[in-house]
Every structure is written in C-alpha cells, then in structure tokens.
Image: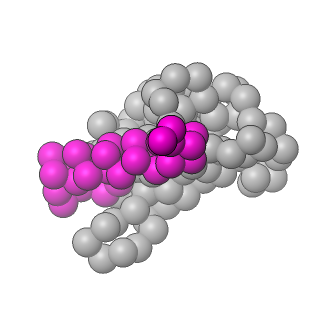
C-alpha cells in the first residue's frame, strides 16, 4: 500500500534526527520548522530538554510577519545566529527535520553560518 506524504515526511524526520543524534552527542540542536505561512527555528539542549534560543518569521521586529519566502528565512537565520552568540553558543548541529535542504531551509542555514554559527 502506498504511503501518504505525511507518513513519508515523518519517516524522513525520524531518520534524519536519529542519524544526527548519534554523530553529534552533547551539542545543541538547531531545529527548523517550516509551514506554509511561516518559518521558525530553535536551539535546543536535548540533554536538559531546554530551548536555548529561538527565532521566527512571526516576530514583528524582523518585519516579515506573514511572509514565508527565502528573504524571511535568511532574516530568521541571521537572528538565530545573533541570539545564539548572545547565549554563548557557537557550535551546534543542524536538524532540518523532514524538510529537504533546499530553498528556504538552505537560505536559513546559510544565513546562520554567515552569522557565526558552526555546523
């Protein structure tokens, strides 16, 4: 029986996350979520179960409320890099979830790297 798009997405998300967890134990996780209208990202400490920093296109100070395009993703990536530096984090690992590393997710990652995050 054919799998639905949602089932394939969930399988891909678990596969990516489990591979990353094995390779990058002890480092914070930069987790990306992309919806049809917004994009958000969190720096998560999985050992303590705490969010260390977060950024989203829903924030009014970024000026991209209701926009979900490559420019909005780049602004969110720059914002998370700035907030991570303020929290004292320079190294993390990038968890794209079940999303493909293309378009908005790629723009967010490149902006975070330019902002000083290493992954």
Q: Position of residue 113 (x, y in %)?
A: 41, 31
Residue drawn at x 80%, y 37% is: 67
Residue drawn at x 76%, y 52% is: 58
Is residue 18 visible to the viewer in this orientation of the structure? yes
> Taking 87 as reference, is 35 left or right?
right
Is residue 85 visible to the viewer in this orientation of the structure? no
Q: Is residue 13 located in the magenta-colored stretch of the structure?
A: yes
Q: Position of residue 111 (x, y in %)?
A: 51, 30
Residue drawn at x 36%, y 51% is: 14
Residue placed most toward the observer, 111 or 6: 6
In the displayed structure, 71 sits above or below 42; it is: above
In the displayed structure, 87 sits above or below 6; it is: below
Count of marks placed on residues? 0
Residue drawn at x 25%, y 72% is: 47
> Taking 47 as reference, is 80 left or right?
right
> Taking 88 as reference, is 21 left or right?
left
What's drawn in magenta, residue-wise?
A: 1-29
Q: Position of residue 74 (x, y in %)?
A: 61, 31
Residue at the outermost right position: 66
């Amino acid at each position: 029986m054919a799998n639905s798009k949602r089932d394939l997405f969930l399988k891909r998300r678990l596969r990516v996350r489990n591979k990353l967890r094995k390779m990058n134990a002890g480092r914070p996780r930069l987790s990306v979520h992309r919806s049809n209208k917004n994009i958000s990202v969190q720096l998560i400490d999985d050992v303590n179960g705490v969010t260390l920093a977060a950024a989203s296109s829903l924030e009014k100070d970024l000026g991209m409320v209701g926009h979900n395009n490559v420019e909005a993703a780049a602004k969110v990536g720059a914002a998370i890099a700035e907030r991570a530096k303020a929290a004292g984090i320079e190294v993390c690992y990038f968890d794209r979830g079940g999303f493909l590393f293309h378009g908005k997710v790629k723009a967010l990652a490149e902006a975070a790297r330019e902002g000083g995050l290493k992954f």
